[in-house]
Amino acid sequence: MSGIVQNNILRSSGVIAVSAAGLNWNSTIITGSTLTAVAGNGYWINTTSNTCTITLPSSAEKGDQIVFIDYLRTWGTNKIIIDSNGLNYQGNDDTYTVEYNTDGQSLNIVYSDATKGWIPLDDDASALEPTAPPTQKAIFGYGDTGSYVSITNLVNSSGVVAADVTGVGTARRLLAAAGYGGDKAIFGYGRPSVEASMTNLVSNLGVVATDTTGVGTGRDGLAAASYGGDKALFGYGNIGASVGDNINSSLTNLVSNTGVVATDTTGVGTARRELAASSYGGDKAIFGYGKTDSDVSLTNLVSNTGIVASDVTGVGTARDFLAAASYGGDKAIFGYGYGGSNVSMTNLVSNSGVVATDTTGVGTARSQLAAAGYGGDKAIFGYGDTGSKVSTSNLVTSSGVVGSDVTGVGTARAFLAAAGYSTSA
């Protein structure tokens, strides 16, 4: 047997066997539906496309060792099946079914004797707990100055808003935006002249791309948020065909981690428009507030697989035309809006999706604004309408405290959108 020889005194033949550190690791990733394993080898098993049945050697000596590892953490979807090939496995003969079906699992087996046969030294799953780099920058884009625009304003990792960048794509208002892919963003839907479903991707340098042909039902007054760590979804909004023709919806469209928008998903929860959304909990999202025939404060949580839950009874002042963003790494904040008059109150959202009661407003009361996370754990509210268009912004600390007004930069406007992008400060 070849391989790096390590201390192993179990082998009955008197020949020193290789240990786990000295296994001959198979250079080919196993993707097939079957594998005939050889003692002394280690195998990376990729079950992305299919279950894999592994046949163990038909004869073995004490101390023979084989290791199998879930290469792409897919055994939970497509398991491995162990065929002990006439020998016992943990004391059971090979008529027993032996399966391993946990994502991230590794299986290290050693042959003992004819009675117990192959025995796992360990069969643990390795936890997948990497933390994605936090979003550092943000972008405000599009909106209504009295006429529709497509200009953007970048926000650096210190919360400083930059001057206008010449617009790219179709000028429109009442659109939505969210981060995707870990470090990029997407603007989508809105109203240029009628409800549209076009999107514009934003690179991790903050460069906005030209229009992408729309997918799903065109609408405005919708919201968007990141979920699942690297994906996004657009949801709810008005699908009426003309100004003043309000037809509320609750349908959603998922966005892949490469920025591809999926077709409509049947709506869950109360159909409404002019709401806000944010990520929370690291990998989930929340839609909240908005307008049906009247303002509401109800929310809908979104799982880390993009599934929207039914209505949660509203907390705080019912209002529309508000904004929301993530802060603190795993929490969210709803703020400002219109509830019979412009307000500046906020509502914090815990990392389990629980919305808190109103916090007294800070800064100029306004509606039709946008918000995004920045700086890894902070947020910014910006622009909007106080009775006239403004470019004022308010920074939010990592503990959810809203700062006083920051003098506006860039073209004052309302009905715009914002999202975080870039993991580089």
Image (cartoon, helix red, strand yellow):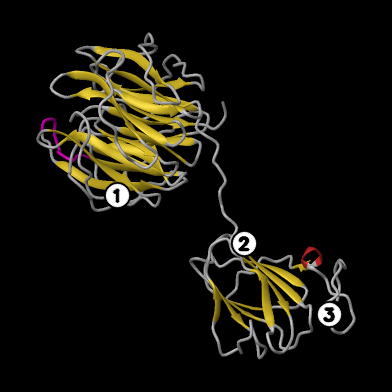
* Real-space Cα separation, disc 2 to disc 3, in angstroms: 29 Å
| Helix, strand or loop status at disc 2 | loop
Q: Residue at x 77, y 66 (%)?
A: 20
Secondary structure beneath dot 1 equals loop
Q: What kind of secondary structure does the magenta stretch mostly adopt?
A: loop
- Which residue appears at 38% of the width and 21% of the height? 401
Q: Are marks 3 and 1 in contact (CB under 8 Å)?
A: no
Q: Identify which amino acid the numbered label 1 is placed on.
A: Val
Q: In the image, residue 332 lies at what x, y percent?
A: 37, 33
Location of mark 1 (residue): 308
Amino acid found under the numbered disc labelled 2: Tyr
Magenta run includes residue 242 = yes
Residue labelled with disc 3: 11
Q: Residue at x 22, y 19 (%)?
A: 343
Q: Is residue 384 left or right of residue 387?
A: right
Q: Residues within 10 Å of mark 3 (few under 14, many from 20)?
A: some
- CB atoms at circles 2 and 1 under 8 Å apart? no
For mark 2, what is the residue? Answer: 71
Image quadrant where one finds the N terminus = bottom right
Residue 407's place in the image compared with 174, above or below, is above
Report the front residue among 245 and 331: 331
The boundaries of the magenta stretch are: 237-244
Callout in the foreground (2, 3): 3
Res 216 seen here: no
